[in-house]
Image (cartoon, coloured by chain):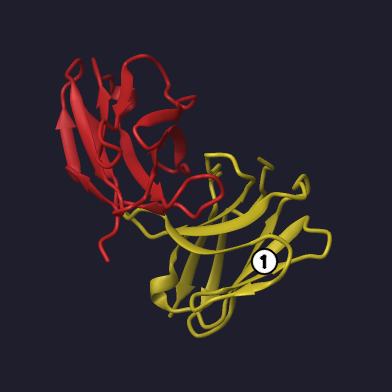
Amino acid sequence: GAGVSQTPSNKVTEKGKYVELRCDPISGHTALYWYRQSLGQGPEFLIYFQGTGAADDSGLPNDRFFAVRPEGSVSTLKIQRTERGDSAVYLCASSPSGGADTQYFGPGTRLTVL
Amino acid sequence: DAKTTQPPSMDCAEGRAANLPCNHSTISGNEYVYWYRQIHSQGPQYIIHGLKNNETNEMASLIITEDRKSSTLILPHATLRDTAVYYCIVRNTGNQFYFGTGTSLTVIP
């Protein structure tokens, strides 16, 4: 079946601009996660959704980062006033019901802030 | 979640078994050991997980020591396509995976 998909695959923007990154989870998965991966590092947790609500947003680095999942399926990660340090690969994962479930990852969106 | 320690890099000859170690000495009783791998420019791929018993699936085997303070991921017959970064993760029912920096495995022809 279809896995987790993310769009765009690459995004280049200028410092100060606003960007949106989209994640389509596996159909039927109620839990959705966003991670950020900098060069040479492992992915770092940003936020976790259970259904439509953000159950854990402790990994968001500051208030420029925001994510939504209005219908409990597709999620959008929004970054305001982008900075060069935001350049990274943003990964999305989903799992059937959260908790200790296995997480299945998408291919990521590579964000470059010039 | 408990922290894990992995060697930064390893080599393995094609066709041979690749044995990737992981130390997790602070693991607690309800924490699972997960392994993922990440091939260049792709998202992490689930491999296997276990709690106490050894596990085997079509991709790999996971050997967990009796005291659960360490584990080994075994790829029985490594191929060039197994070249990747392998992450050992220990987690409870929390929402996050803590990936660390993993082991970069290079399979040599």
- Which residue shows up at 29% across the image and 46% down it? A108
The chain coloured yellow carries which letter? Answer: B
- From the viewer's perspective, tell me whether residue A79 is left or right of residue A99: left
Q: Name the one closer to the observer, A106 or B23.
A: A106
Q: What is the x, y in percent for residue B6? A: 64, 53
- Which residue shows up at 33% across the image and 52% down it? A28
Does dot 1 land on a helix, a strand or a loop? strand
Q: What is the x, y in percent for residue A69? A: 29, 33
The chain coloured red carries which letter? Answer: A
Amino acid residing under circle 1: Thr
- Which residue shows up at 77% across the image and 44% down it? B26
Q: What is the x, y in percent for residue B55? A: 64, 72
- From the viewer's perspective, tell me whether residue A45 is left or right of residue B10: left
Q: Name the one closer to the observer, B70 or B18.
A: B70
Q: What is the x, y in percent for residue B76? A: 56, 81
Q: Name the one closer to the observer, A72 or A48.
A: A72
Position of residue A83 relative to residue A12, above or below, is above
Position of residue B80 relative to residue B100, above or below, is below
Tell me the quarter of the picture where residue A47 sits: top left
- From the viewer's perspective, tell me whether residue A93 is left or right of residue B18: left
Task: Identify residue for label 1.
Answer: B72
Label 1 resides on the chain identified as B
- Which residue shows up at 38% across the image and 60% down it? B39
Report the quarter where the C terminus of chain B lies: bottom left
Q: Residues within 10 Å of mark 1 (few under 14, many from 20)?
A: some
Report the quarter where the N terminus of chain B lies: top right
- Name, please, the residue furthest toward the right: B67
